[in-house]
Image: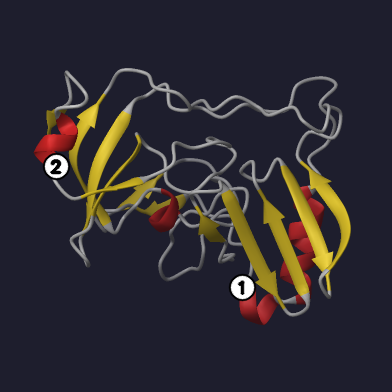
Amino acid sequence: MELNWIPNLQENLLTFEIDNLKYTTIDGGQNIKKYIDGVYEKTIRQFPGRPLDWIAPSQQPPYTNQEGDGEDEWFEELDWLISTYSEELGEKHLVTTYRLRDGNLWDAGRVLGNGANNLTDLISVNRLGQPASVQERWDWEPLANYLKPVELSENGLTWSRNIHTGEIWRHGNAQHCPCHVFPKIVKPVQVFDLDADLANYPGAQKV
């Protein structure tokens, strides 16, 4: 199972569309708006017991439901999507062995997130159905780190280069698309002169 959420990282927006359905979220999936034929139907909430404007903190491991938060409403919707569009989305594979970025298999000893995207790739998928290859920037190589906390990233910043295009971007350390771990992310910035940009962050180091 895998859902192709399209990111607009400058707006912290994720969009998933299939058939006449559209889902959008600006907080990593804590509140997901559902549209049918372009008409708003409902908001699917991760923490329905919380105020609508409450955002769980970015942290690793991620914040999990506490007493009074209510039951996550996304899983019922996700199961319906998978059963309705199984040919497009695939099935859930609740395995415990996954393929890592380096291609090796790893026995986690438990199901991670929503299991694997398929039984060939065995890439783990998160709560939203995003594969680790996307969420963990498998197409990017890190060039430098700044490990002091910044706004929206307590783990600092990373400069990464796309292995296909050669583009360099500065982004939150360990962040890519918004998700339940990082509901709000640092807006990525394209960098054209790495050394000059690093000079703006004393203590930043190349890797």
| Residue marked by disc 1 | 90
Name, please, the residue furthest toward the right: 41
Instruction: Write the residue at 72% across / 77% down.
Output: 85
Label placed on residue 131: none
| Residue lying at 55% horizontally and 36% vertically, measured from the top left | 184
Chain-order first, disc 2 or disc 1:
1
Q: Is residue 89 left or right of residue 178?
A: right
Q: Secondary structure at mark 2?
A: helix
**Eyeballing the image, is 31 above or below 133?**
above
Q: On screen, 128 above or below 45?
A: below
Q: Residue at x 20, y 26 (%)?
A: 200
174 relative to 198 in the view: left or right: right
| Eye-nearest disc, 2 or 1 | 2
Q: Position of residue 146 (x, y in %)?
A: 24, 26
Residue at screen point 83% across, 36% down? 71
Q: How many marks?
A: 2
Give yes or no for contact between labels 2 and 1 (Cβ–Cβ under 8 Å): no
Q: Position of residue 63 (x, y in %)?
A: 62, 26
The image position of residue 92, as x and y in percent, is 63, 62
Amino acid residing under circle 2: Leu
Screen quadrant of the C terminus: top left
**Secondary structure category for the residue under label 1:** loop
Nearer to me, 131 or 7: 7
Distance CA(mark 2)–CA(mark 1): 41 Å
Write down the residue under mark 2.
194
Q: Compared with residue 91, is residue 88 higher up or lower down, i.e. above or below? A: below
Circle 1 packing at 10 Å, graded few (<14), some (14-19), many (20+), is some
